[in-house]
Image (cartoon, rainbow, N blue to C red):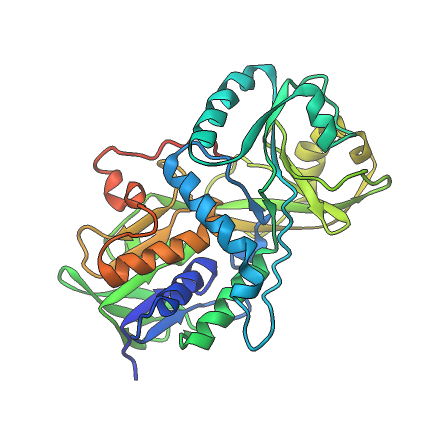
Amino acid sequence: MNRADVIIIGGGVIGSSLAYNLLNDGFTGKIILFEKDCLYEFASTPRSAGGFRQLFTTRVNMELSKYSLQIYKNFEKTMEVDGEEAEIDFKQRGYLLLATEEMMSQFEKHLKLQNDNGISSQLLQKQELLNIIPELMIDDLSGGLYCAESGYLDPYSVMQGYIKCSKKLGAEYIYNEVDSLLIDQDHMKGVCLADGTEYYAPVVVNCAGAWASFLSEKAGLPLPVVPLPRQIFHFDVETHLKKHLPLTVDPTGVYFRHEGGKYISGYAEEIEPKIDFKWRRSAFIENIWPILAHRIPNFEKLKIERGWAGLYDYNTKDQNAILGEHPSMNGYYVAFGFSGHGMQQAPAVGKCLSELIRTGKYETLDLTPLRIERFTENQLVQEDAIY
């Protein structure tokens, strides 16, 4: 009863995408997913901002986004279960990176890379920004990098869509905490739960997000990933904007977008790595509100309605995902370190890891640049567009 062919640690969007893709691709073995948070109350996916972008500068990240975009565009019907569509509220309202004069030359380079890789991004001049956000204050801007087919979606619904389809296809979810990995010399044996129960499988995939590196390090297989809190604030305004916003990133790093008829905002706060789910109103008032009010006058008068914090599984070396089989542990696969890009890359990651586990090689996309060995080989993935 305690045996499986594949054990997946973490039943969030990455683990559930992998389970779905394995089974949908014809894998006939038994798959068990362990998820310690049965309500997904503290899971990173539903606490994310839900942004989806293709504005990257490395080939592997652009390929991940291009593939995932096609999945999300058809997600509702593809992931239908018992006649019920998987509504994910994907709003293709665009993704806009605002630029000062100093940033424009860099964005020109980014534009060429993206266009050469099939991404329909545009470099907008100063006045063109007003066509997208009429209220935008542009005195200190020179333009922006814009991708119209990107946007934002409901990350919780994406995760639930994968969970429902995985269960429908036969994946078993056990809501219990994995305490440690079971190892027999140089290959995986299974996992030990917090209550002492052992489960056995020749393949174990660590998709535990912000907690993944703790498990790996406990097994003597450390990877450079730490939990990093990120706050998001939900607010309303007295005078609403004329148009729906793209997900917009200010040159300061503060981002904002519509959330229904209201708005959310956040920024990359400089903070020590830790597990912390507290949000602070003062962080918004001191660090975000002045920037919002400067950029869009409508945001001068606003009301904070709520806030929350979630965790990045933050890769301290190059802020990109770590994917694939561990070079010194047969049967141990990892998929974490996404540094805020997990939800938007989940469809492609699930598909490609399914191929790697089933066939021993990538087929749809070549994700070898994100291998574990890149750290010792000094082959880091240097992504210029980290937001």
Could you tell me how many numbered marks the image carries?
0
Q: Quadrant of the N terminus?
A: bottom left
The vertical placement of 164 against 51, above or below, is below
Q: Quadrant of residue 82?
A: bottom right
Furthest residue in direction left, as rendered: 185
- Residue 227 visible? The answer is no
Q: Position of residue 132 (x, y in %)?
A: 71, 32
Q: Position of residue 227 (x, y in %)?
A: 45, 48
Seen at 76% across and 30% down, the residue is 296
Seen at 55% across and 51% down, the residue is 310
* Left or right: 346 in relation to 90: left
* Left or right: 345 in relation to 199: right
Residue nearest the viewer, comparing 110 with 182: 110
Seen at 44% across and 68% down, the residue is 35
Q: Quadrant of residue 248?
A: top right
Residue nearest the viewer, comparing 138 with 277: 138
- Residue 348 visible? The answer is yes
Q: Position of residue 340 (x, y in %)?
A: 49, 45
The vertical placement of 341 against 333, above or below, is above
Furthest residue in direction bottom, as rendered: 1
The vertical placement of 109 against 207, above or below, is above
Seen at 52% across and 46% down, the residue is 229
Furthest residue in direction right, as rendered: 238
Q: Position of residue 131 (x, y in %)?
A: 73, 29
